[in-house]
Image (cartoon, rainbow, N blue to C red):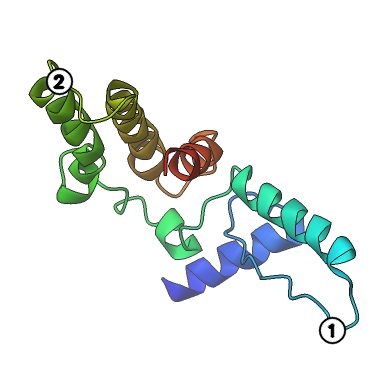
Amino acid sequence: QIEELTSAVRQSAERGDTGSLPTLVTHIPMPATASSSSWLPAWIAERAAVTLSYRTIIPVGWQLDRSLPPSYFSAYGLSCWTYACLGVWTMLRFRDASLFPGMDVEAILLVAQSVTSFGCDVLTFGVPSVWKPIDRMCATTFV
């Protein structure tokens, strides 16, 4: 099985088809001689490219083994919906008296995060998809 995986990775690399291969994102260190004005745009561009990428970080071996995508009803598959449970509980528990302004919006955003998390982490497990950047943007924005 390792030989099949190695062969598949080699063939994919020879074709230049790295879209389904995970990429290692490296930190761009600030050179000692660089000014912050030249380093900061490169760092921002790198972070934006990673955030907006459709690529997956699931190892290639997992992508080739089709028995690995998680079941919708496994603990992993259902864990995405914990955000929604908290959001719905908040809406029901505090429907008459919010603890802070905008609490209803926060509860709705928790439900939305569950949907994007499920789409990214379960529906498209190990496959590049539009759910990847959507989930990353929602997770960082909602925090």
Identify the residue at image location x=83%, y=67%: 36
Q: Is residue 42 left or right of residue 106?
A: right
Residue at the far left: name it: 93
**What amino acid does circle 2 point to?**
Ala
Q: Is residue 77 left or right of residue 42?
A: left
**Residue 142 badge:** none
Question: If the image is split into quadrants, where does the C terminus sit?
Answer: top left
In front here: 75 or 127? 75
Quarter of the figure with residue 79? top left
Identify the residue at image location x=76%, y=52%: 45
Q: Nearer the viewer, mark 2 or mark 1?
A: 2
**Residue 97 badge:** 2
Quarter of the figure with residue 88? top left
Q: For marks 2 and 1, give the CA distance.
A: 54 Å
As drawn, 2 above or below 140? below
Question: If the image is split into quadrants, where does the N terminus sit?
Answer: bottom left
Q: Alpha-carbon neighbours of circle 2 within 10 Å: few (<14), some, or many (≥20)?
A: few
Q: Is residue 122 visible?
A: yes
The residue indicated by pointer 1 is: 32
SS category of the residue bearing label 2? loop
Residue 103 position within the rendered picture, expressed as x and y whole percent measured from the top left:
28, 27
